[in-house]
Image (cartoon, grey):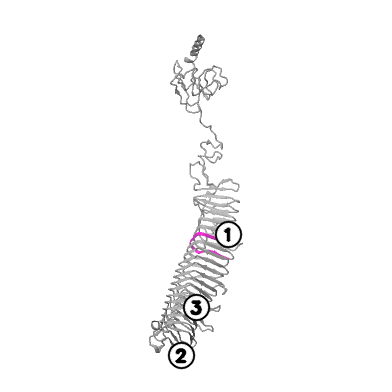
């Protein structure tokens, strides 16, 4: 047995221990078997890298020697790689990556240290020349590092270049397919713009730059601007014609070199987030057009900024927008149309809104340097809420239907001329402010009312000026309630002038008049039968007559003043009031001064005064009638006259009428100190 084993070992050494003629990688004539060799198979030691239990590779015909598990080793116990032939030793090596062979320090054999191939195979699913490992979308041949970006919101270059570059355009069809429009749109010129009409449901995307286009959007299609592109040309075509169900966003329109509408709406459509510049008019709505403008900037037109022409319900809604530098009206409507403005600023325009019919609705609108804020005629009706007008040059004219104005202010300009065709037309101003309005020598600095039924409630009139009625001139029925008039001035009627009306008496209720001035009627001048319940007249002044109120009325029905206060008013005659035909009840007259009649004065035979329960304190006259100087018929009941510090005093002494001086006429005195 020992002889056989020695012989076998001796034979094995001759076969494996000596250099093989074909082994050119060995580097020596003697490969010594080393128990620590872990790189290649040893015939008598276990290679820990490629341990072969002699049962894992079929067809191992050599012996129990360890073999490479990559393939059947049919000629020796040398580990081999089946990827490719090693041309200098016959040993198989890996050729698809860099071969980092090193010398086996145990045996001197050069071996391949990258036996396992970790490189992925080269795959190009979309056949665009870029393998999967370099292509961010290997299912789209239009997307790879060498592709061209389009205006579709998609990264086609795998981050190589920016998405949506300026100067590109594309359309997404209703089918979901994209078409590039860059070359087509770029071919337009200012005089010959590209004419393009969308199909149903198309979405056109326009990226940056200036484009000579004339677009027709129809049937639910839309135009989306990226990086705020501009459509501009000089041809006689609209920049955009918007049909039913269309939307335009993020695009500027500039047709300042042509006289057609920049944006034309013929159906239900929306324009948002862009500027519109037109030479004649900017926006034109007609037919069944119903246009909504959102966050728009309309500017520099010689004609109206927005025109709405009669059709099948034509209308415009403008929100959160600005309209500036307009040669015509900011909004012009014709026929039975509608205009709604909300949170809109109008600056430097010939007119604010002009209408002949239909309806207007304004909320949160401001107007500055608008020559004539409103011009309404025909049958148009309007509702204004939170509207603020500053620096107008021409009075707003309203020759139309019903008008309701609430929570609004009018400052430093001309007021309103209200003269609808139907004298019973309702016009209302609620919680409004009129400040610094100036009618010059004309009528009504704030309101000039003729031929209508006007009510003013809880409003404030301050520092307004006019020839007749610094704040209001009314030549028709007017109802003033809960309003305050301060510092207004006119030749007659410092605050209010009430002209004679055939419609009905004027009513002034719960109002305050303070520090107003005029030649006649420091606060109010009335030539109409008027009622004044619960009013306050304080510190008003007339150079001639009626510091508080001057009444020039001789009709059958008297004016009435009830439960009101007249305090510290002054005038040449009739400090508190200069009267004609008057009935009073429960009023307080205190500290008023005049030349004659500190509180009340009347001087003609036709004047009639009937006093009931009034109180007079500390009024004074420079000549006669410390409280009352009266020439006509006079009657009174339960009157109170102050004494001591509150006594009414004429400058000429008691003989001139401490409280009352009757100059002539019939006397019916049931109160003290009547001096005929």
Which residue is denoted by mark 2 in the rendering?
Answer: 664
Residue 242 is situated, as x and y percent measured from the top left of the image, at 57, 56
Q: Nearer the viewer, residue 544 or 562?
A: 562
Q: Nearer the viewer, residue 545 or 144?
A: 545
Question: Which segment is the magenta one?
Answer: 314-334
Residue 274 is situated, as x and y percent measured from the top left of the image, at 50, 55
Residue at x-position 52% and y-position 59%: 319
Mark 2, secondary structure of its residue: loop
Which residue is denoted by mark 1 in the rendering?
Answer: 290
Q: Quadrant of residue 516?
A: bottom left
Q: Residue furthest top?
A: 3
Q: Is the residue marked by circle 1 packed among few (<14), some (14-19), or many (20+) residues within 10 Å? A: many
Residue 402 is situated, as x and y percent measured from the top left of the image, at 56, 70
Of the residues under marks 2 and 1, which one precedes in the sequence? Answer: 1
Q: Is the residue marked by circle 2 packed among few (<14), some (14-19), or many (20+) residues within 10 Å? A: some
Labelled disc at residue 656: none
Labelled disc at residue 532: 3
Q: Is residue 278 in view from this perspective?
A: no
Q: Nearer the viewer, mark 3 or mark 1?
A: 3
**Residue 634 falls within the magenta-colored stretch:** no
Of the residues under marks 3 and 1, which one precedes in the sequence? Answer: 1
């Amino acid at each position: 047995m020992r002889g056989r084993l020695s012989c076998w070992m001796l034979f094995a050494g001759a076969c494996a221990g000596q250099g093989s003629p074909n082994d050119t990688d060995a580097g020596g004539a003697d490969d010594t078997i080393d128990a620590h060799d872990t790189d290649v198979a040893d015939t008598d030691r276990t290679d820990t890298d490629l341990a072969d239990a002699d049962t894992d590779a079929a067809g191992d015909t050599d012996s129990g020697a360890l073999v490479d598990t990559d393939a059947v080793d049919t000629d020796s116990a040398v580990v081999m790689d089946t990827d490719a032939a090693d041309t200098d030793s016959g040993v198989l090596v890996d050729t698809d990556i860099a071969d980092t062979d090193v010398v086996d320090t145990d045996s001197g054999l050069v071996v391949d240290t990258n036996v396992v191939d970790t490189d992925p195979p080269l795959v190009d699913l979309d056949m665009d020349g870029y393998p999967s490992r370099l292509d961010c979308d290997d299912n789209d041949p239009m997307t790879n590092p060498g592709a061209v970006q389009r205006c579709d919101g998609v990264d086609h270059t795998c981050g190589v270049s920016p998405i949506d570059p300026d100067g590109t355009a594309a359309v997404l069809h209703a089918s979901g397919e994209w078409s590039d429009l860059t070359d087509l749109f770029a071919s337009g010129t200012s005089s010959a713009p590209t004419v393009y009409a969308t199909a149903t449901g198309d979405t056109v995307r326009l990226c940056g730059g200036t484009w000579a286009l004339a677009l027709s959007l129809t049937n639910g299609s839309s135009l989306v601007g990226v990086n705020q592109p501009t459509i501009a040309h000089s041809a006689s075509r609209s920049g955009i014609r918007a049909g039913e169900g269309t939307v335009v966003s993020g695009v500027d329109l500039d047709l300042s070199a042509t006289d057609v509408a920049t944006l034309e709406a013929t159906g239900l459509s929306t324009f948002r987030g862009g500027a519109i510049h037109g030479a004649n008019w900017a926006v034109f709505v007609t037919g069944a057009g119903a246009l909504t403008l959102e966050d728009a900037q309309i500017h520099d037109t010689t004609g109206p900024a927005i025109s709405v022409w009669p059709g099948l319900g034509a209308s415009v809604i403008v929100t959160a927008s600005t309209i500036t530098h307009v040669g015509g009206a900011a909004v012009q409507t014709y026929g039975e149309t509608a205009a709604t403005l909300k949170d809109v600023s109008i600056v430097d325009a010939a007119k604010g809104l002009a209408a002949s019919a239909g309806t207007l609705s304004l909320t949160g609108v401001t107007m500055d340097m608008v020559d004539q804020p409103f011009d309404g005629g025909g049958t148009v009706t309007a509702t204004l809420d939170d509207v603020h007008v500053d620096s107008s040059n021409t009075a707003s004219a309203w020759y139309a239907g019903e008008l309701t104005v609430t929570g609004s202010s009018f400052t430093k300009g001309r007021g309103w001329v209200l003269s609808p065709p139907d004298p019973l037309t309702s016009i209302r101003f609620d919680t409004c402010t009129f400040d610094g309005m100036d009618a010059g020598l004309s009528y009504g600095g704030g309101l000039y009312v003729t031929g209508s039924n006007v009510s003013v409630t809880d409003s404030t009139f301050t520092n307004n000026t006019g020839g007749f009625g610094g704040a209001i001139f009314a030549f028709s029925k007017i109802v003033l309630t809960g309003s305050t008039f301060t510092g207004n001035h006119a030749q007659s009627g410092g605050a209010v002038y009430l002209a004679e009306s055939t419609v009905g008496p004027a009513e002034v209720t719960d109002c305050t008049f303070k520090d107003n001035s005029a030649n006649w009627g420091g606060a109010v001048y009335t030539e109409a039968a008027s009622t004044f319940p619960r009013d306050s007249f304080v510190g008003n002044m007339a150079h001639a007559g009626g510091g508080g109120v001057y009444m020039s009325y001789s009709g059958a029905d008297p004016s009435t003043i009830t439960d009101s206060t007249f305090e510290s008013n002054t005038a040449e005659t009739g400090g508190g009031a200069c009267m004609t035909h008057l009935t009073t009840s429960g009023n307080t007259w205190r500290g008023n001064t005049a030349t004659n009649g500190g509180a009340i004065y009347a001087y003609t035979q036709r004047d009639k005064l009937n006093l009931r329960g009034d109180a007079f304190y500390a009024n004074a006259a420079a000549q006669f009638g410390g409280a009352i100087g009266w020439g006509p018929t006079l009657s009174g009941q339960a009157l109170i006259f102050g004494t001591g510090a509150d006594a009414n005093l004429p400058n000429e002494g008691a003989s001139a009428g401490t409280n009352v001086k009757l100059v002539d006429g019939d006397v019916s005195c049931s109160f003290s100190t009547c001096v005929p």
